[in-house]
Image: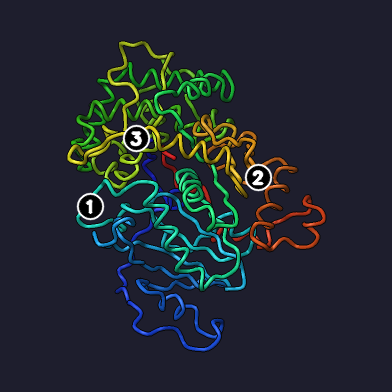
């Protein structure tokens, strides 16, 4: 689960920068009297352990950046605490609340996930533990696992449920969709529904043939041939293009201690190329890929690979923000290993490298193969009010979550032709209406017309181009 495009912007993995504003901790409880009579800021800051970083204005809402004191180890709170970053997009305590996590950093700009727009509700967004600045100091990496992260969410939910008393729905895309699913597995009584977007499900880490089958048939043969040609040619011209890479690294102060060498970083970037295209591009974008790679210039090959994979990512500076992800991939989540039948063996020195190669060696790692099997088994037999949305052309959907006979009011839907940005809006009309109706129902806000005829389901809030900005962040990992 891998790699990043150099021009990371904020959203699907949502990376926020902590404000320089001085954090203010509430000293006084909320005003007495009916809960609704206290200012929402007072009510939030009356929660023990909740501190204000800043409030940002947004028409129709109040937006707060907060931190919340969490145990490093929920099983042994005496081991210490850390401050976890949270944002609250507040609309009204009488509206439902959507609990969002990207599985990575949290954005400190007001944003609204698709379910939040659908239900016209509040949104609580949580930064995943160990993503800076929500990292214990010193960091005991053994405390970074899916149960501890789910327990972070559970504790935040319990703290805020007294403020936001209406229905709650959890959501997230990619690793955030995985996070929402794991939260439901460990705390199935918290949420009234789950909407998990493009969530990979690597049940058996050593069995990844589904990805090879995906790449053999995705898109069109012409498009696959173009992509494969550029990828192969970048390895044929390795020595010449590595000279450019070395100059690029020197100019920007990039180093390669974690991955081990510039050569390893170069091959890893090139091997991400085809995956990266399908993850974030559409079939129509094949026109931008050099049609005759063998006769393309070095500049054309470099630019195409850099645009899609990003030569900065496997540097120490590119990997460092994602150490928590790769640690989890190498200990619990699993990571794909794919093959390259269009590239002769003589051009491949390392192949698809494992997560261990992207985490500093001083951090110990040991893979736990039973963890994902447990989650998969639970979802198949116990899913209730869960919706999984995938994109037809997204590589991460090659190993999706599936539902068994024990699932109740739960769905796995695929948006035709879409990629890692697939959402409810991209589903075919009948499935779009079904998904929207179920989300409204789980949130407790389905209008009578929708209850009578689910095909009438529509988002309750008008689309806001700024608030509902999606798909801007591009990272080649879930």
Q: CA distance from mark 2 to mark 1?
A: 40 Å
Nearest the viewer among 301 and 444 is 444
Q: Secondary structure at mark 2?
A: loop
> On screen, 358 above or below 191?
above
Q: Residue at x 67, y 42 (%)?
A: 427
Q: Position of residue 370 (x, y in %)?
A: 40, 34
Q: With 4 as the anchor, is 116 left or right in this view?
A: right
Earlier sequence position, callout 2 versus callout 3: 3
Of tags 2 and 1, which is closer to the observer? 2
- For the residue carrying disc 3, how many other residues have a C-alpha within 10 Å: few (<14), some (14-19), or many (20+)? few
Q: Identify the disc placed on residue 408.
A: 2
Quarter holding residue 78: bottom left
Q: Identify the disc placed on residue 368.
A: 3
Whether residue 295 is visible here, answered yes or no, is no
Q: Position of residue 95 (x, y in %)?
A: 61, 69
> On screen, 12 above or below 311?
below
> The C terminus is located in which quarter?
top left
Earlier sequence position, callout 2 versus callout 1: 1
Q: Secondary structure at mark 3?
A: loop
Report how many numbered discs are placed on residues in the image: 3
Colour scheme used in the picture?
A: rainbow
- Check disc 1 and report the residue beneath it: 139
């Amino acid at each position: 689960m891998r790699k990043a495009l150099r021009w990371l912007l904020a959203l699907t993995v949502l990376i926020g920068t902590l404000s320089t504003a001085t954090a203010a901790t509430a000293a006084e409880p909320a005003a007495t009297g009916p809960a609704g009579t206290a200012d929402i800021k007072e009510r939030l800051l009356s929660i023990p352990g909740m501190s204000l970083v800043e409030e940002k204005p947004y028409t129709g809402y109040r937006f707060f950046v907060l931190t919340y004191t969490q145990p490093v180890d929920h099983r042994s709170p005496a081991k210490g605490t850390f401050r976890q970053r949270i944002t609250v997009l507040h609309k009204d305590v009488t509206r439902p609340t959507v609990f969002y996590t990207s599985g990575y950093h949290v954005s400190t700009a007001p944003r609204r996930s698709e379910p939040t727009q659908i239900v016209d509700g509040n949104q609580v967004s949580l930064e995943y533990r160990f993503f800076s600045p929500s990292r214990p100091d010193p960091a005991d990496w053994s405390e970074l696992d899916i149960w501890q992260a789910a327990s972070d969410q559970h504790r935040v939910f319990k703290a805020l449920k007294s403020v936001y008393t209406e229905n709650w729905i959890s959501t997230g895309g990619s690793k955030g969709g995985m996070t929402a699913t794991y939260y439901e597995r460990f705390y199935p009584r918290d949420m009234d529904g789950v909407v998990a977007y493009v969530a990979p499900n690597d049940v058996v880490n050593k069995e990844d043939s589904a990805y090879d089958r995906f790449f053999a048939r995705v898109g069109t043969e012409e498009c696959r041939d173009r992509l494969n040609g550029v990828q192969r040619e970048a390895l044929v011209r390795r020595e010449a293009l590595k000279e450019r890479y070395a100059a690029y690294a020197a100019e920007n102060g990039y180093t390669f201690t974690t991955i081990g060498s510039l050569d390893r970083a170069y091959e890893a970037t090139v091997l991400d190329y085809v995956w990266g295209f399908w993850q974030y591009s559409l079939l129509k974008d094949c026109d931008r890929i050099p049609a005759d790679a063998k006769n393309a210039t070095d500049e054309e090959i470099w630019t195409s690979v850099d645009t899609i994979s990003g030569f900065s990512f496997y540097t120490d500076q590119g990997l460092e923000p994602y150490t928590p992800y790769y640690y989890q991939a190498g200990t619990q989540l699993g990571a794909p290993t794919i093959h390259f039948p269009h590239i002769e063996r003589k051009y491949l020195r390392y192949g698809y490298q494992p997560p261990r190669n992207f985490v500093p060696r001083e951090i110990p790692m040991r893979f736990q193969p039973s963890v994902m099997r447990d989650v998969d088994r639970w979802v198949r037999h116990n899913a209730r009010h869960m919706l999984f949305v995938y994109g037809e052309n997204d590589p991460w959907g090659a190993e999706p979550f599936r539902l068994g006979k024990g699932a109740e009011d739960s769905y796995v839907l695929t948006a035709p032709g879409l990629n890692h940005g697939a959402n409810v809006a991209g589903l075919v009309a009948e499935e779009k209406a079904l998904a929207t109706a179920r989300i409204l129902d789980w949130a407790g806000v389905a209008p009578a017309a929708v209850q009578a005829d689910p095909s009438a389901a529509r988002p309750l809030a008008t689309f806001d181009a700024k608030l509902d900005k999606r798909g801007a962040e591009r990272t080649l990992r879930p």
